[in-house]
Amino acid sequence: MTEAASRPTLEAVAARAGVSRATVSRVVNGGEGVREPLVERVRQAVEELGYVPNQAARSLVTRRHDAVAVVIAEPEDRVFADPFFARQLRGISKELTAHDNQLVLLLTEGRDDHARVARYLAGGHVDGALVFSLHLDDPLPGLIRHAGVPTVFGGRPGWSDGAGRAAYVDSDNRGGARAAVRHLADLGRTRIAHITGPLDQTSAADRLDGYRDVVGHAEPLLVVESDFTPGGGERAMRALLDRVPGLDAVFAANDLTAAGALRVLRERGRRVPDDVAVIGFDDMLPLAEQTDPPLTTVRQDIEEMGRLMARMLLHRPGPGAPGGDGAEADAAAGVVLPTTLIRRASA
Amino acid sequence: MTEAASRPTLEAVAARAGVSRATVSRVVNGGEGVREPLVERVRQAVEELGYVPNQAARSLVTRRHDAVAVVIAEPEDRVFADPFFARQLRGISKELTAHDNQLVLLLTEGRDDHARVARYLAGGHVDGALVFSLHLDDPLPGLIRHAGVPTVFGGRPGWSDGAGRAAYVDSDNRGGARAAVRHLADLGRTRIAHITGPLDQTSAADRLDGYRDVVGHAEPLLVVESDFTPGGGERAMRALLDRVPGLDAVFAANDLTAAGALRVLRERGRRVPDDVAVIGFDDMLPLAEQTDPPLTTVRQDIEEMGRLMARMLLHRPGPGAPGGDGAEADAAAGVVLPTTLIRRASA
């Protein structure tokens, strides 16, 4: 066990350099107000002893950690099961690394742990937080606001109070859904079903709105709520076929769900796209190219969303910068990336 | 953008409670030496204002963060591509959550970022670190020792100096490999190939030793170094078949590699197990049950390894505890978990 006992202290550096503790502390934190020969002596002692400044103390002065927390508001097993999160983290990781900032991923077993996450965020260990996959009734956004950590959200936050002030990056979920369902209608399909995501997430609610923009509210039997997982897609597809055996198209709220739906359609002997046309959302590769048949889907640039979230956080104006208060907050509020319909064989 | 400006200060709490800053600070850090009525007034003011103590300042006093870093010495895209890491993290996450400790996963783009990881570890943000997937020439262990953070390694560390003092959890890699290759020999196979993992990792080197314990060093053409990935397994299997077309068994250093090897064997028209028997390592589910044919493999309890690493770190004797210095370090050094051969159809 490597123990802290062997770590050289500030006192040891002071003794070696023949200066006071306060002088060492000032040098370690930037050296302002210390004469050059003393700075040199302290630096040499630091080097000789292999002293590592205690950053908890140091950050009290500098208020910088060069570290950014990422919080995915899902249990850790979902984080690793859904490639969406890996993709978004890839964009975040590349951007943070380019700025020599450490990516600090805070994993949880579930919502019960969110208070602990907020404590860590409030604890002065990171310069800001990137938070995604929020659900509507999650206390996390409130806890984060309380913690006072600069935050950028992935996906438009769903709360109403002060939502105008929250910085976020989103995709045009409603427009993308509308394009998908319009394509199905243009193919002459008249009974178009929709397998939704969890409707306590704005991404899923917005995709449902886009679906309704085209088909209206006429046939509630054609809409089934699901959970963005392949297993959920299978269950939803079975329920839809039991209710409306004559359906001729399905718009699934993401590609994982669409893959589950395709399996059930094959199992039930429906040909895709001849009997039932299917469209997904995400363009998650390689999955969307490997389904049988390959999946027509709405592409969103997930990695770019992650990159942009990191960029917005790193380049935010400081509290003292011009326009760094209320005015800037509204300007920076939301960035919405476009989506594209990608045609493959399934529709 | 949620900015720190709105965060209530220690001064505000002191003013509201009608006490000094020092009194508020003492109460927030445990309340010792403060009379009960004052403690009550401060607590009430903290609650009314929604004050969150600055943990950077607080941890200078308490020296506890209730947070543990996990470092996987691989680029973040490998972390998400290999289910081994998700499995180990699951065990770690469950154990840390049970002790209300925050799991802080430090992701990197590669080895160039390890100095930054070490800075974060040294910075007083966590109580300890769990480090796995180390490669031999990685500077990380040295940097971590310098940082003075209590550390438990996943897998036996490969460096020689002071390795006896490092705490680690490992599987019986050599014994498991020996059992696998002995099983192939018992089936009457005489040309048994081995696809290794990266030989700068002790897990891979130990499995090669186990293979050699049974077959000796006679046929170097039958050993190909690979990288624990499915694509690497495909390349290695092609190379082996080109070199030794008559081989009749393969021991792959993990299940991902074995899955790649199975694909190439099918592609080249070899029947498994009739022409070539195949054994993997890990018992990674569902993969090992879903290969064609299902995979005979050496099971190691990856989740339990993660759980045990977390437990060793959380329950380590403090520097002041009895035997908390040199003596304890040797006692705690290494825990090696047993492995089991799981027979399915491939051998």
Image: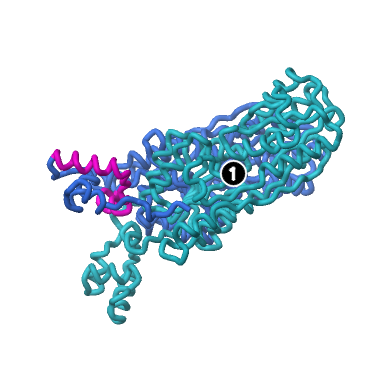
Chain colours: A cyan, B blue
The residue lying toward the viewer, choosing from A137 and A314, is A137
Residue A81 falls left or right of residue B124: right
Where residue A150 appears, as percent x and y from the top left, is 45, 53
Where residue B85 appears, as percent x and y from the top left, is 55, 42
Please tell me which residue is depicted at 77% across the width and 42% down the height of the picture.
Answer: A289
Please tell me which residue is depicted at 41% across the width and 42% down the height of the picture.
Answer: A143
- Quick one: SS at disc 1? helix
The secondary structure that most of the magenta stretch takes on is helix
Crowdedness of circle 1 by 10 Å Cα count: few (<14), some, many (20+)?
A: some
Give the residue number, with chain letter if any, for mark 1.
A85
Q: Is residue A77 above or below residue A323?
A: above
Q: In which quarter of the image is residue A179?
A: top right
The residue lying toward the viewer, choosing from A216 and B233, is A216
The residue lying toward the viewer, choosing from A79 and A214, is A214
Please tell me which residue is depicted at 82% across the width and 29% down the height of the picture.
Answer: A190
Where residue B318 appears, as percent x and y from the top left, is 28, 45
Residue A334 falls left or right of residue B36: right
Q: Mark 1 lies on which chain?
A: A
Q: Is residue A200 visible?
A: yes
Q: Give the extent of the magenta segment.
A: B36-63
Q: Quadrant of the C terminus of chain A?
A: top right
Please tell me which residue is depicted at 78% across the width and 33% down the height of the picture.
Answer: A278
Residue A209 falls left or right of residue B41: right
Q: Does the magenta stretch include residue A56?
A: no
Q: Can residue B182 be seen in this view?
A: no
